[in-house]
Image (cartoon, grey):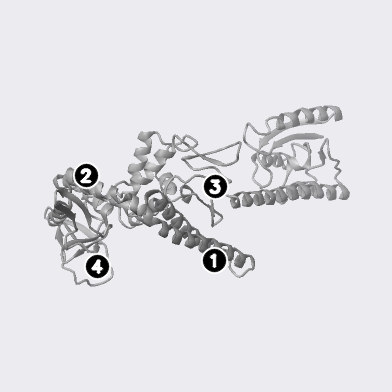
Amino acid sequence: MKYILYARKSTEEDDRQVLSIEAQLVELQEYAAKEKLEIVASLCEAKTAKEPGRMKFAEMLAILEAGKADGIISWHPDRLARNSVDGGKIIHLVDRGLIKSLKFPTFWFEPTPQGLFMLNIAFGQSKYFVDNLRENVKRGLRQKIRNGTWPGWAPVGYLNNAKTRGVDVDSEKAPKVRKMFEMYATGAYTLHSLANWCEEKGLRGNLGKPLVIANIQKNLQNIFYLGLMKWKGEIFEGQHEPLISKKLFDTCQEVMSKRGKVQESHKNNFAFLGLLKCASCGCSITAERQKGHNYYRCTRKKGPCQEKHYLREEVLTEQIKSFLQKVSLSSQDTEKVLAALDSEQDKAREDAQSEISVLKEQLASIETKLLKLLDIYLADALSTEEYAAKKQSLISEKMSLSEKISDFETKGLSWLEPAREFVKSLNQAANLVETENLSELPTFLKNIGSNHILRNREFVFTPKIEYKLVAERSEANTFSLQFPKWCA
């Protein structure tokens, strides 16, 4: 009688179960020699048997069906099958007489009703072991995620810690990942340009592969960088250190959402495409080239629009640069305004204490709501989808409150730091008045304001800081900065 020797280990990784197949082969060859069994083929593979689809296993069945062998030698029935499909194939071949003998050093089998019954039990036990192990692993992963520990591979910017089983910040890659978010938030960089930037800076994935556009987009949408974790559709708070703030993350999502509606590259390279909305109907302002000039107009996707049509790019550029001239600050004025803001720092911190108390009360309220939400879910009053959606909303609100509290505690009133950045940006406005690179203008306008619209062929927008910045200029004179009346 001719036999096929079959050995299998459960993993393809070389550093796990390294001696498994070698040990099986030695034991099986000794067993075959002792029993004086003829081996016509020896098949080995590193593949789990919990799912059908093993190539060597299929090759073995083909040899048996061709009549080139009569039996199988293996260490144990669980080496042959841990799923009902492959186990059923073995038993079916025994029933058809194509397998006349199965030999196992640790298991007895004869092709009789009793032997088939015992073989069925062995295959069933093997499947039960896999199924039970799967549930135990899932339970362990669920508990790990509840404890705030990510159970999978960490994204770029983090490293899996083999000792603590946690996730640590990658000191080399983390600053580059943070910079990538900051660059994209400006709206001046496309996913393609970020991919090139990553290549230039040597920022690669944790497996050493280049970050392509799809990787970068996925990373920019990954809430893991906020300190949160999404697992099976549910949001959990993580113990790992966040790399970015929620505000920066939300800005990136807003930029990406707008990019999804406007193509990133255009044949005629319209500088202000994607920046403006129509004041009357809210539709996007599109652009087209006629007779050597770029024109901007409402898309009218919602129907007829009462706005005047077509504004030449030169006129729009002149309006924007006229605004920049009015709000630009000299270096001397910038220093005086910043000095005035610095003098407000101590007072701002004192005033912030009452605000912090209110925010902490709101934070405690959110914590209570999360506990009540869990109780309602456990009482089967909410579906899994409803629970996950409500929990995500509450955790997002909780993160926003936590960041506000942190800002108040470290910076005083939250308007001070944005005010400083705003003043510094106005110092740069003078350079933009002279620039010939129009693509720099939309980036600046997005940084200092929002809701950019065209109303009666005039550019209008809402400034992010809606108060006056006042600083001493010289002696009794004062310097005041205001937005032009045509700002929204």
Q: Amino acid at mark 2?
A: Glu
Say which label, 1 or 2, has the lower sequence index: 2
Label 3 Cα crowd, 10 Å radius (few <14 / some 14-19 / many 20+): some
Q: Amino acid at mark 4?
A: Arg
Residue tagged 3:
239
* Spatial separation of the CA atoms under disc 3 and disc 2: 41 Å
Q: Nearer the viewer, mark 1 or mark 3?
A: 3
- Residue placed furthest toward the front: 476
Q: Say if mark 1 contacts mark 4, CB within 8 Å.
A: no
Q: Nearer the viewer, mark 4 or mark 2?
A: 2
Identify the residue at image location x=54%, y=65%. Answer: 369
* Spatial separation of the CA atoms under disc 4 and disc 2: 46 Å
Say which label, 1 or 4, has the lower sequence index: 4
Relative side of 243 to 256, left or right: right
User: Mark 2 falls on what kind of element?
Assistant: helix
Label drawn at residue 300 = 4
User: Mark 3 falls on what kind of element?
Assistant: loop
Where residue 404 sits, quadrant-wise, is: bottom left
Q: Nearer the viewer, mark 4 or mark 3?
A: 3
Residue tagged 2:
335
User: Mark 4 falls on what kind of element?
Assistant: loop
Residue 188 appears in the picture as rendered: yes
Q: Quadrant of the N terminus?
A: top right
* Spatial separation of the CA atoms under disc 1 and disc 2: 52 Å
Residue 266 appears in the picture as rendered: no
Q: Is residue 215 above or below residue 465?
A: above
Label drawn at residue 395 = none
Label drawn at residue 386 = 1
